[in-house]
Image: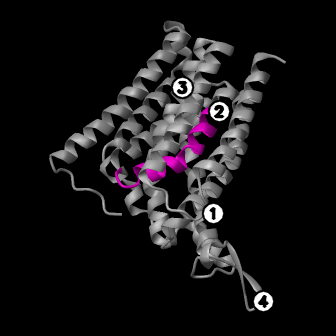
Amino acid sequence: MNTTQISYLVFGIVILLALIFDLGLLSKKNKIVSLKAALRQTFFWVTLALGFFVFLWIEKDQSVALEYLSAYLMEWSLSIDNIFVFILIFSSFSVKEKFYGRVLLIGILMAIVFRIVFITIGVALVHRFSWVLYIFGAFLLYTGYKMFTTDDDEAFDPQDSKIYRFLKRFLPLAPHDGNGKYIVRENGKPVYTTLFVVIILLAAIDLVFALDSIPAVMGISKDRLVIYTSNIFAVLGLRSLFFLLRGAVSRFDYLQQGIAIVLVFIGVKMLGEHWINQWIDKNVQVFISLGVILLCISGSIFYSIFINKKGLPQDKEV
């Protein structure tokens, strides 16, 4: 086996054991997740992700490991931006807090499957048609500009979304949670509860966010191992991150602008890759990308906290 195959094998074993450990010991069915438990679970997933970074540093090389770390931080920061939309979905469908954990888990596992398909298609397109990277770069520039100047999350109404209208049109939906069930029988026929709808919405919304994040990661690295592993580690940690930050995420008013700057930076990097490679060494580019991501994300979070302490702007209402 070569180093790449060994890396995939180790990654698969780690994820499988981690999910068993998370489900068996860290998570309990229909139990409200406390802040302490959320902190413990977040630490668990972040430690695993950083442990894999160390493994890549030893097994592969420094450049691949730093690309992975940059991609993971990019995905992790975008995950924080996802949480506000997730809160809106739970609130809109009046999901009981005790059901949050399992609903998030199933939705996230579905999202991972969709992301794997999306990444596979995207990587195949780039390998076959290299000019696709320029389209991704232009898309990131546009997305970053729109994200910096607008706030689409506040306008999002889950019950007015195309996904929900599609489900409502083709499936018999129940206006209740079925006491924790996803499908119940009414008048002898199967009916889908609000929990089922929420799971589909979570997975679909994450896929929409992936339209930004996956091209961004491909702008950081073209290594399939880096793209797959950084995405999966970040998404698997999203559930614990939700419970940890749901009370504070509305205070990160300027996080969206920080992410937008990173997307614009990566978009410019993708569009100018041919000329950048002639002037800047690949390893130096990796360090620059990592530095920009750390500076923009941490800076936007700390600036948001500083502004909120002064009382402006007002917190978003969920």
Label 2 and label 4: CA atoms lie apart by 44 Å
Main SS of the magenta part reads: helix
Query: In what element is the residue under mark 3?
Result: helix
As shown in the figure, which amino acid type bears the numbered disc 2?
Answer: Thr
Of labels 4 and 1, earlier in sequence is 4
As shown in the figure, which amino acid type bears the numbered disc 4?
Answer: Gly
User: Residue 69: which disc?
Assistant: 3
Residue 97 lies left or right of residue 253; in this view the side is right
Mark 3 crowdedness (10 Å alpha carbons): few <14, some 14-19, many ≥20: many
The quadrant of the image that shows the N terminus is: top right
Of labels 2 and 3, earlier in sequence is 3
As shown in the figure, which amino acid type bears the numbered disc 1?
Answer: Ile
As shown in the figure, which amino acid type bears the numbered disc 3?
Answer: Leu
Rendered residue at 68%/15% (across/down): 59
Mark 1 — residue? 200
Query: In the rendered structure, which segment of residues is drawn in magenta?
Result: 229-248
Mark 2 — residue? 229
Whether residue 304 is visible to the viewer of this picture, yes or no, is yes
Which one is in front, 124 or 23? 23
